[in-house]
Image (cartoon, helix red, strand yellow):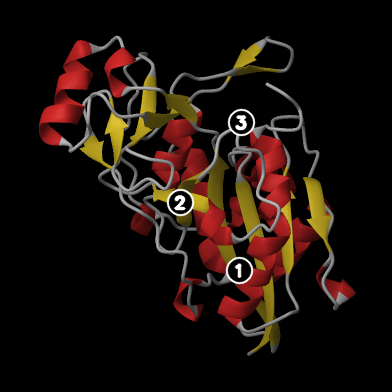
């Protein structure tokens, strides 16, 4: 895959547009977005940009101290809310005709039940449903990328989606970019877990995703409405619960978010970093200053 057309390039091309969109949705120009690191030990943030108020620019340790203080002292006059979103970028590939797919049962299901046309082009994004290795191949994640998104979709207020372009490599990037160039497919409670060890895709009837299905046993995949409201903002305590839930759900797939409580041992840096490092690489945390 060319470095000029990749999932990372796609994300970077539209990053500022999402930032402006959130400015508008939350009616503020004073917030900060953080991108947590991957599995390297305690690397903190790969990337962060400072808003006008430099007080809200953090290192990983600063973030730990900041959120711990607000969880322990929620009555503080100066506080902030957070918006957690998990947009996993995927490129789409074109099938010149749907009929070329090898899985005949899937072909029959898409054409007979889902409204796809066998002789027409179709598009698909490959889903990562197998746990990946890291640390130079010496360790394996306990869950796949898709499963990580599925778990997070159980958290109230978390916005979880696959983000795919409405164009392919041969089209190139649009000259005048806008968020409507992107297709957001919501990951939610009805999304199949797809942890059977087989290859799976998200299928689209066309580039805009007029029809879209989780495959190989096709299940309708819903569009994510990209309008957001103040009701989606989390308190620091709610975000802390999200971090703990995501970490514990690695070994407890049926965990209920509403049962998660924060205790004193969670306030230790080592424990917090365990929670933090377990977040998927597509995590974005937006801090919105508020006077309360």
**Quarter of the image where one finds residue 280:** top right
Q: What element carries label 3?
A: loop
Q: Give the position of the N terminus as an image quadrant.
A: top right
Q: Residue at x 67, y 75 (%)?
A: 288
Q: How far apart are marks 3 and 2 (CA)?
A: 21 Å
Q: Which of marks 3 and 2 is nearer the N terminus?
A: 3
Is the Cβ of the residue at disc 3 closer than 8 Å to that at disc 2? no
For mark 1, what is the residue?
Answer: 82
Q: Is residue 83 left or right of residue 41?
A: left
Q: Earlier in the sequence, mark 1 or mark 2?
A: 1
**Quarter of the image where one finds residue 270:** top right
Residue 63 makes an appearance in the image: yes
**How many numbered circles are shown?**
3
Is the Cβ of the residue at disc 1 closer than 8 Å to that at disc 2? no
Of the two numbered discs 3 and 2 in the rendering, the one whose residue sits closer to the viewer: 3
Crowding around mark 2 (Cα neighbors within 10 Å: few <14, some 14 to 19, many 20+) is: many
Q: Residue at x 73, y 47 (%)?
A: 12
**Quarter of the image where one finds residue 224:** bottom left
Q: Tell me: residue 190, above or below residue 31.
A: above
Q: Is mark 1 on a helix, strand or loop?
A: strand
The numbered mark at residue 170 is 3
For mark 2, what is the residue?
Answer: 184
Q: How far apart are marks 1 and 2 (CA)?
A: 21 Å
Q: Which residue lies furthest to the left in this view?
A: 112
Q: Give the position of the C terminus as an image quadrant.
A: bottom right
Q: How far apart are marks 1 and 3 (CA)?
A: 38 Å
Instruction: Measuring from the top left, give residue 71's x and y in whole percent.
Output: 62, 69
Of the two numbered discs 1 and 2 in the rendering, the one whose residue sits closer to the viewer: 2
């Amino acid at each position: 895959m060319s470095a000029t057309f990749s999932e990372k390039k796609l994300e970077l091309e539209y990053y500022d547009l999402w930032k402006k969109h959130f400015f508008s949705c939350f009616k503020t120009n004073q917030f900060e977005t953080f991108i947590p690191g991957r599995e390297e030990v305690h690397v903190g943030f790969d990337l962060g940009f400072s808003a006008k108020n430099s007080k809200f620019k953090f290192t990983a340790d600063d973030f730990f101290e900041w959120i711990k203080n607000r969880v322990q002292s929620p009555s503080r006059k100066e506080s902030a809310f957070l918006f957690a979103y998990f947009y996993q970028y995927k490129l789409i590939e074109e099938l010149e005709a749907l009929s070329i797919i090898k899985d005949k049962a899937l072909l029959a299901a898409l054409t007979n039940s889902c409204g796809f046309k066998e002789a027409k082009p179709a598009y698909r994004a490959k889903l990562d449903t197998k746990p990946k290795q890291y640390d130079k191949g010496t360790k394996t994640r306990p869950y796949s990328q898709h499963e990580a998104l599925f778990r997070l979709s159980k958290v109230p207020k978390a916005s979880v989606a696959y983000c795919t372009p409405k164009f392919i490599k041969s089209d190139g990037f649009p000259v005048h970019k806008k968020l409507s160039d992107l297709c957001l497919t919501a990951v939610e409670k009805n999304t199949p877990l797809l942890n059977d060890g087989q290859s799976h895709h998200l299928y689209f009837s066309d580039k805009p995703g007029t029809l879209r299905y989780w495959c190989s046993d096709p299940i309708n995949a819903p569009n994510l409405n990209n309008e957001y409201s103040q009701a989606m903002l989390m308190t620091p305590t709610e975000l802390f619960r999200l971090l703990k839930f995501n970490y514990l759900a690695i070994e407890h797939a049926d965990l209920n978010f509403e049962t998660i409580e924060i205790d004193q041992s969670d306030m230790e840096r080592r424990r917090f970093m365990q929670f933090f490092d377990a977040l998927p690489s597509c995590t974005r945390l937006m801090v919105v200053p508020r006077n309360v």
